[in-house]
Image: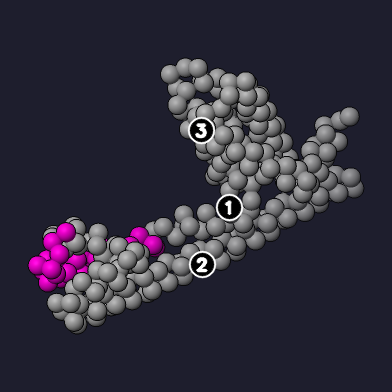
Amino acid sequence: MNLNAIKNALVKLHNNKAFEFAVISVIIVSSLLIGVKTYDINPDYLFVLQIMDVAVTVFFLVEIIIRFATTENKKRFFHNGWNIFDTIIVVVSIIPIDQSEYALLARLIRIFRVLRLISAIPELRKLVSALVKALPAMGYVLLLMFILFYMYAAVGSFIFESINEVLWGDIAIAMLTLFRVVTFEDWTDVMYETMAVYPWSWVYYLSFIFFNAFVFLNMMIGIVIEKMQAENNTELSEQDIDLRDRLARIEQKLDKLKS
């Protein structure tokens, strides 16, 4: 069997939905193994868990080799951040450091293997990529939220400190109280306590909730949706580039055959 036949077989295997499902299943099994090891287990079963862990590591190694082998442009393989992440996880997992002073690091790396579920599912990859790209814009929204938190906390501390010093004693504690309000954690108890002294204080709480829980939250959702749409457009562009590359290679082969 020549190399082209082997490569074509690997491509078919990599593009097979059953293989994709197997990869996702093994990632889930790997996650369950991590959770099982946190319990007190009979020592007789530890050997079985170790064998399963080794089998998972070998499977991940074979899967990453197949993915690399089926990539047309090998240089572009490491242009993808998810490929780099998966490769690092697999390489570190096969290093025998379990019995050394770096045993804790080995365990942490195995925990991060759960994140491979994101790289294995395209929809999750798009979501995470969009979230990462949205962080700079979301940072400005968070800054604006912080300014509003600070202003409302200062006002609340000045006005409500005499009512409940535990909740409004200083600006830092007041900001924590407002965080409780914006997350709707028994916020009505805080409001009714101040309304007993200042009946108009409901305006303070409702306006704060309106801006932070509704306006700014929707702004963040809008930013993420916009980045997801941009991510979809980028993926379509990359698919067009790959298609053009394949067509160019086919044309080159046809020209060689003609000549």
Along the line of sight, which residue is nearer the eye, 84 or 109? 109
Q: Residues within 10 Å of mark 3 (few under 14, many from 20)?
A: few
* First-in-chain label (2 vs 1): 1
- Asked if the magenta segment contains residue 164, the reply would be yes
Position of the C terminus, as image quadrant, is: top right
Rendered position, 26 above or below 226: above
In the image, what residue type sits under mark 3?
A: Thr
Q: Position of residue 148 (x, y in %)?
A: 25, 69
- Judged from the image, the secondary structure of the residue bearing numbered disc 3 is loop
Q: Gap in Å between the C-alphas at discs 2 and 1?
A: 14 Å
* Label disc, if present, on residue 125 of the rendered structure: 1
In the image, what residue type sits under mark 1?
A: Arg
> What segment is highlighted magenta in the picture?
137-166
At horizontal 64% and vertical 51% (from top left) the residue drawn is: 121
* First-in-chain label (1 vs 3): 3
Q: Gap in Å between the C-alphas at discs 2 and 3?
A: 37 Å
Q: Residue under label 3, please give it.
A: 38
Q: Position of residue 22 (x, y in %)?
A: 73, 42
In the image, what residue type sits under mark 2?
A: Ile
- Foreground tag (2 vs 3): 3
Along the line of sight, which residue is nearer the eye, 40 or 98? 40
- Judged from the image, the secondary structure of the residue bearing numbered disc 1 is helix
Q: Gap in Å between the C-alphas at discs 1 and 3?
A: 28 Å
- Foreground tag (1 vs 3): 3
Q: Residue under label 2, please give it.
A: 225
Residue 231 seen in the figure: yes
Q: Residues within 10 Å of mark 2 (few under 14, many from 20)?
A: some
Q: Residues within 10 Å of mark 1 (few under 14, many from 20)?
A: some
Q: Main secondary structure of the magenta part?
A: helix
* First-in-chain label (2 vs 3): 3
